[in-house]
Amino acid sequence: MKTIFPILMLLSYLILAQPFAAGQKFATGKKGLNIYHKSWVDFNKNGKKDVYEDPDQALDKRIEDLLQQMNLEEKTCQMATWYGYNRVLKDQLPTEDWKNKVVKDGIGNIDEHINAVAYHGNTVTQYSWPPSSHARAINEVQRFFVEETRLGIPVDFTNEGIRGLCHQGATGFPAQIGIGSTWDRELVSEIGKVTATEARSLGYTNIYSPILDLARDPRWGRTVECYSEDPCLVSNLGLEMVKGLQANGVVSTGKHFAVYSSPKGGRDGEARTDPQVTDRAMHEIFLEPFRTATEEGHILGFMSSYNDYNGIPVTGSHYFLTDLLRDTWGFKGYVVSDSWAVGGLQGRHYVAENFREAVYQSVEAGLNIRTNFTPPEDFILPLRELVTEGRISESTINSRVRDVLRVKFMLGLFDNPYVEDPEKADTIVHNEAHVKIAKRASYESVVLLKNDVNLLPLNKDALGSVLITGPNAKAVNHSISRYGPSNIDVISLYDGIENLVGDQVKLEFAQGCDFYDENWPLNELYYIAPSEKQQNYIDEAVEKARKVDLIIVAVGDDEHTVGESKSRTSLNLPGNQEELVKALYETGKPVVVVLINGRPMSINWIDAYIPAIIEAWFPGEYGGEAIADVLFGNYNPGGKLPITFPRTVGQIPFNFPAKRSSQKWQGRKEIGSTRVNSALYPFGYGLSYTTFEYSDLQVNPKNQVPDFDSISVSFTLKNSGQHAGTEIPQLYIQDEYSSVVWYEKLLQGYTRVWLEPGESKQVTFYLHPKNLSLLNKEMKRVVEPGIFNVYVGASSEDIRLSGQVMISE
């Protein structure tokens, strides 16, 4: 029951009204079949209500009835993806030729159909906008499978959704690393709701989100797409995204399962192999967000990853896809492969001599649906051969297809396969309420890293002129992702400031430099002087800087320096950006650095010499507005870093949490005789325009037994400064002595607290046995007797209060 009840919440969103195929619901005027009845659809066109067509029948009975009517061709078609328009599928709407293709027997899902993907001009389509046009077009595609296939099995329409829905004009949000900086579970739930509501109105039923990977190596290009390096934070935020999506009518498909984010050397692209992770760390750290999403969020989808673990490719691993995911965690949905993950068994990992063998290994392991940028028959036909030959049993096929059908039934596709009211989509996508959530996300994601001499907030009444420079001053592409909305109007930093100050402050602009030049990344290996073009940019910025009162320089990344297949061997600013900042500093004018980036950066010189630094990450559609309001004091930043900033790439791995003594100093100093060991900015770090005091820690009870109910940890938090603001107090736990090497400390609680100047509030966290547990020598989760230190602070290193709990035998 515990699994079924949350899933039924998914169905509560669906309006199970009578499925009537009215003409206005479809993109064409084609007349539909007479198979739609008041409370059911005659999917197999036999003139009677079969069990699988009856909404009043039990879920399992409906699944088994349909499965018994399916032949091998129909079953195998449910095990493949058809990539959407101009990826694989060449038609925007069904054609007569579809009846001659393998899809005449159905298809498991269709991915990213007529959605207009950012940076992919060949996907532009007349049906992506307005939203109602897309809803009608999706209905038209669905109608082919309902009316023109023998059993009428509907399609699951999938799409990406890590920064908002991957569709033209959808509501855009900051990158996941920025959302991680909000430490705001309720906000993430709202983002899930917005994404799901827009998706369902457009006809999508399954969203590939959230990314549940841990960013443990910041060289890795997809760090920008991760919430955090910490398992507690990723688990919490990921869980809220799963629930936000699934409670509002779509399936959440989490990715990338599993141990994907720690390839050897942080390499990406054609590598994506050999994660340097022990079995214990895998279960304690990397798998925890996936377990949480499954056992607590009842997630209905996972994407299997490209990588291997301990020599076994995950997409061909029975342990990961069956033993762990289904038998241990109780997963009830279906697993789709990441693109080319099946082929990678042959062409990346070399454990399959040919693609046919790769199909065999992946299906036997537990894969339900293969996805790739090739026609679905490339997978379906060898799969049928393997069944005919007896290498894959029909019972195995039935098991894989059963999972796919279960999800489709739970989505309500067999009760109403169509978008009921396409016109309503025009009032949903990017509406005012959704924009409000997007703005909130952009504001909350900003982190104040440094503010010496209280340079910030700026006073526009006291400023005559300001230079805004740097490659990210007017850039917007950082907040337009291939995995998020396209054709959205992103507010740049320059535009955000200009909109705020109006005519009160004279604004100057200079490019400053590009993100990188023709010498990059070679100039990360040894110094190469800026090219003539870049030096001219720098000189222009310096000349203008000498004539203004203050300089705001926006540096960092764009979509070419961080992201999928964009891992790096350095964490320094790319190209000539640091040279630009140094040249501006030499003018003697006050300088504010704004980082707009997707990974931690080793900005040691900037931290040493520049008085004010803001981390904005890839801030989303309204990022420029949010940064401007932070700079000028209309918003007090409250974000905290979800990831450690190492001082140098030579420290990697250097992250939180870390095993006991693994990141200690040499020679008892953070800068020893041969090595630098401290973080530039630690996990959980973030400043404010106000100050906060922590006091009166109470741990109750202080003595417990291993199977205790709960322990409360309460304290008083006071805004001791002059500005209203948000603080994010953090609770950390340390086991003094344990049977296995444990972590220095683990995040086990946090909350966002808004306080007016002088206001105090009591904050209470609750610890449960899981918060004090570990995997013992036998890899069993237990609470061991002993002393546990309880820490409360403003970051993982800024501990303000401490206490203890004793767990007795």
Image (spheres, grey):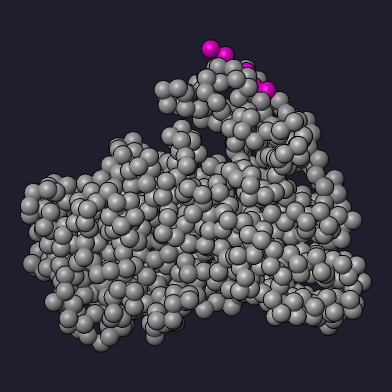
Count of numbered tags: 0
- Does 163 lie within the magenta span? no
Where residue 391 sits: x, y (%)? 12, 48
Residue at left offset 42%, top offset 55%: 271
Residue found at x 28% / y 69%: 374
Residue 501 lies left or right of residue 349; in this view the side is right
> From which residue to which does the magenta span run?
804-809
Residue at image point 34% right, 38% down: 324
Name the side, left or right, on which 280 lies relative to 555: left
Image: 171 above or below 220: below
Residue 182's quadrant in the figure? bottom right
**750 versus 768 height, above or below:** below
Q: Position of residue 642 (x, y in %)?
A: 62, 49
Residue 19 seen in this snapshot: no
Q: Nearer the viewer, residue 636 or 753?
A: 636
Where residue 472 sits, quadrant-wise, is bottom right
Viewer-side residue, 36 vs 274: 274
Name the residue: 70% across, 44% down.
679
Quadrant in which residue 736 is drawn: top right
> How far across and down, in percent of the image, does residue 740 sit?
52, 23
- Report if residue 807 lies within the magenta region: yes
